[in-house]
Amino acid sequence: MASIDILTLSSTPPRQFGTCNMSSSPGLPSPSNLFMKKPQIIRSGSRAAPIPQNATASFTSAATLIQKASDDIQGAETIRSLTLASADIYDIDTTEPTKPLKPRTKKVVAKKDDPGNNKVAKPTRKPAAKKDEGDEVKKPRKPRAKKSEGGLAENGEVDVDENGDALVKEKAVRKPRAKKADGDTQAKISKGKVIKGSKAEVPSKNKVKNIDSSADSLDFGLVEAVKRRTAWTPPPPTSMSSVAPVLVDTSGEGLGLLESEEKTSGFTDLLGSFGFTSSDAHHGARKVSEGAGTRKRKLIELVNTNVGDAAVVAAAPKPKGPKKKARTITDQATSAYREDEAEPPSSPAPPAPLLQYFSYKDTVNNDGFKVPAKPRSKSPVKGGLKAKKGSAQAPILLSPESALKQVGNQDFVFGTSSQLAREESPTFLRDLHEAIQASNQIEDDPFFDILDSSSPLPAFSSRGKALASAKRTLWSAGARDMSGDLLDVEMIDMVDSPAVAKMLKASATQPSVTSLPTRADGWLDVEELSNSALGFTMEQMPATNVGPVERAIREELLSSPPRSSMQKQNSPRPSKAPKKPDIQEPSQSSTNPQASQAPKRPDYESYTTAQLTKEIASYRFKPVKNRDQMVTLLEKCWEGKNRVALGALGTNKNLSKSTVNGSSPANEPPASSQNTFPKRSRGRPRKDSGASLEASPAKPKTKGKVGRPKKTETVEFPEIDSDTPLSQIRTPKKPLKKAKRPVDEISDSDTLMTPSPPRRRASQLGTSPLPLRLFNPADEEVAELTPAELQASLFSHITKAVTSLPPSTDPLKPNWQEKILLYDPIVLEDLTLWLNTGALDKVGWDGEALAKEVKKWCESKSVCCLWRENLRGGSRSRY
Amino acid sequence: MPMDRPIPAFYCCYLLRSTVRHGSVYVGSTPNPVRRLKQHNGLAKGGAVRTSRKTLRPWEMTCIVTGFPSHIAALQFEWAWQNPHITQRIAPEERLQHATQKKRPGQPKRPRHSVSSLLSNLHVLLRSPSFSRWPLELRFFCADVHKAWTKWTKVTAESIRDSIPIIQDFSPVNTISSGDEGASSPKNKKRKTTHGIAALPVDYTDQKTYVEMGKEIVEFEREGSCTICKSNLEHDAGIYTICPSPGCESVTHMTCLSKHFLHGDEETLVPIKGNCPSCNTELRWVDVVKELSLRMRGQKEVEKLLKVKRARKTKGSASQAAVDSSDGEDDADEIMEEFVPGTQGMVADDWRAIDDSDGSDAESIASNVSFAKTTSLQASKSGVLGTVIEDSDWDDMDVLN
């Protein structure tokens, strides 16, 4: 903790300042501005329209994004830090008199305002150290309390500094958030604010409880204080919940502040309290924006906060933030399944996850944020928590992509209830669907080509794609053996060999040829990725977290441009943001993705041959003899992976890059982060979507077009239109398909087009023709005679077989000839059976006679014959 | 499932025609044409729905195909005759009628039949390999139908198997009836009807002497050796055929006899007829086999047949014996036949009365007579042939009187 905190201190201040200035704060430094903000909140509470204006004024796209991210992260961090700090404080308190602690804690619990006063009184350091921030930053009560405690003890001081910094930063972040959030919330839903108040209360309680628990463990005297706090807690929230009481409190606080110390500090406290509430409100607002009813959410949020806190207490303080984020993201997709109360707090803010994601990048890359390491560690922890919850409770929350994949695997049948209620086995419909899909896939969709051609990408690419699609199936079939595996890797390499690839690139038509091998590669990659992804999701939570984070980023990125142009439209974000950004971004980011990917690709040529073989083996390819081929193959594989990870979300990526550039020097770091976690996570979703194949750098650009991907995807997966993330996910797929234009990429795209079916086709095609050919020659040998002649010879043999029998010795058991002579009706099945069980062999007929043929023989001999089984399925028992 | 029944004494497929409207025809099969015709005419239960319309009654059997070796064979032939448009017994190139319409379930709709179409299809069926070697006989009861048949046979290039007997069994024009009939009782009269379906041998009476002979040979184990292969014929150790000709008593393996009959034709399985290797009498294969089947599988039938004999002896009335023998086939028939004499008497009385009142009204007479089962055919014929029938009826009445 300490080390992390220190790091954060170094990096955070500049960012915060920058962000604050950039986003909303420029007007804030003066108390008047602060007051202005408060009214905004009030307005929001009153559902007044003006809020959007503030939001617009305050937000610039990049800055806002960064701020949000930082805010979210900081918020999470603050909570953790608070808990930790509280624990520390308690320790200190134990050494020191217990009295001071109790009141402080009470204050904190009671209301933000009260704690704010206390904090203001002692923690002057913070404001002094960071007055600029302090203006903006309204510190939660707890941090202040910590500071005060820290002031008492040296250790505490050190902690306080760290904590305080963290708190200040966090607070600062929070304020902007709150403001932004308020703006968002206002635009989206007015009620959100009210919810916020309630939420704020709950969290405070939770924190107190946590503290208590920690205190209990540490010292007994503290426990009592905690109890008192708990007793106290209820009233403050009520005051907080209503906007009016807050104002009153603020006024009271202001008086107190005046008495005790500077007005500014008092204002800051007031603001801080507001900010805290606002942050809470922000979550609520975001939840609202997500689309759930406000009322319900309130309740849920309350419960959730408790649960989340409990979870935090149980596991670790840090995880809270990330958990919240991840949950929030998943919430959108899994809103119907919200059972986990802990999630709601995180769920409320989709943007928050986005911000977190950025923060991750930033932290990783720049160290700009205070606790880079924490989020990482936290994210996995969260995953674990989630998994536990999932196992314990009914639903396991999956990352949106994994969920999508499951949806894809899960066959949905749409129809009327009567249709669905049929008794047909579930497999019947599935098989039917598969058969239909297979048949459809065999014939490439003519629309794919059309779509591709319509895409803004270069015309040659579209043409090549069409050709590729047309030939795809045959090539794929030819390249596969019976089991669906690649027949010969070398063949593929031949096609893919760099020289050839160049040639192909030059000409648009050739891509089709290359498509096969690339496709195969893509498939293999997909499998691997899927497996790995699954493993991650199941075992390691980070993967799941990443998925949501990515989504959040996408949303953020998408939404950011509109913001810049439109200034804020909070509510529309999810819906509008994705589409607009897609269109705009693709053009912008065309070059970026390539650059980002290029550095990532390992230099396979520098590998030893053994390493290369190992790598190839990792891709499940059969060993390749030629080193060059190995290199090219690996490169393709790598591309495929990257595309899966990055390419699918190409638009998002582009956006993220642009945003990163604008906000902070995070270009490189995100790339590195992507290489590790993000890629895999991305890969999963793509796999899910079926577009997991290789995505070349150029592809992301093309991906920008939303319409195409949806169409292609819709075939494979039932999509939920309402959720923006899904639509975004769809978009990535499209780009992949479009990406075909670059030769290598084209092949990848092809694979994307036909995810699983091609294999089947290949196997089917390979198997079916062979047996037929084999059989035909054999038949021909036998059937040199014309059918009529064959039949004649068969008949003569049958006649011979029947007439060559010795007379029967039992009158009751006449042989076949005697039966016929007696005009007995001949049962064809019996006669056929008899003929085929040796009678024909004895007369030199090598083969069997069909009952049909026997019947014809009987009729040709005027022998009365009949089937044992009649048309109704019954069998004749007597004649 | 071994065959457990002897070759039936009688089974026929018949072409039924409405005496009122000659365009209405019906194809059916029955082991007892008299009973069946009563059903069609509504005199007994169980008539076919197609023949239930009163305006079309009475029906007449214009021609019948007899000699089916099993009821299954008869039913198969009936179906093929009823459905000449879809039966596989008719080769595609031979098919005369084709389905032009389809029924709702997709089955080809049966084309509308007429006497001529059915006769032509009958011709085709009798030519077809499926039925060509069956021991069938063709019997015509209506001259016009027979005329149409002969006309058709002349038109068609191919002919049916020569050995198929085509019997013209028209109502005797004052011919046989008067000469043969010496008895005055109505029973004798019925018995004496030597034409029409009433005269058909629907039981094994014709086989009686044959059966008795065969039974005797077997019971006393006098099989001896096969006349053909000269091998010893162990009792009850094989299927042996016995020459029906009196005094021949040659016993052979059935397979030996068939080979003998076939004269080395290996492609043919079932002979149609041949000469007894011993007495050189021409034998129909079906007769030989029928007796054999009775011996092997028809203990009940044989008992009835022989029992009837005894009954006859006791009663001393040949006619009665004949009636009893028919009883075995069907009780209903028996009842019917017993009742027939009475009805005939009634009819005769009515007819006489009519005759007395109106003098001579052929129409009324014909209609009246048609109700009597035995004379129904004649009546219908009379309708067709006009005056000639009148005479016959008159003759009958005279005889009755």
Image: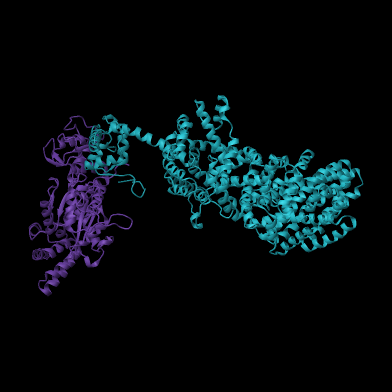
Color encoding of the figure: by chain
**Up-down relation of residue B250 to residue B198 (above or below):** above
Q: Kindly identify the residue that appears in the image at 78 percent across and 38 percent down.
A: A3
Within the image, what quadrant is residue B107 found in?
bottom left
The single residue placed furthest to the bottom in the displayed view is B357
Q: Tell which of A106 and A775 is nearer to you.
A: A106
Task: Indicate the position of residue A390 as horizontal and vertical percent values.
Answer: 66, 46
**Up-down relation of residue A86 to residue A245 (above or below):** above
In the displayed structure image, the side of residue A733 where residue A206 appears, left or right: right
Q: Tell which of B327 and B35 is nearer to you.
A: B35
Q: Kindly identify the residue that appears in the image at 90 percent across and 50 percent down.
A: A100
In the displayed structure image, the side of residue A536 where residue A368 appears, left or right: right
Q: Tell which of B326 and A147 is nearer to you.
A: A147
Task: Indicate the position of residue B25 as horizontal and vertical percent values.
Answer: 21, 60
In the displayed structure image, the side of residue A553 where residue A444 appears, left or right: left
Chain B, hue in figure:
purple
Q: Tell which of B103 and B382 is nearer to you.
A: B103
Task: Indicate the position of residue A757 as horizontal and vertical percent values.
Answer: 47, 42
Q: How many marks?
A: 0
- Could you tell me if residue A106 is visible in this image? yes
- Could you tell me if residue A623 is visible in this image? no
In the displayed structure image, the side of residue B114 where residue B385 appears, left or right: left
**Up-down relation of residue B337 to residue A507 (above or below):** below
Task: Indicate the position of residue A654 as horizontal and vertical percent values.
Answer: 59, 45
Q: State the quadrant of the N terminus of chain A.
A: top right
Chain A, hue in figure:
cyan
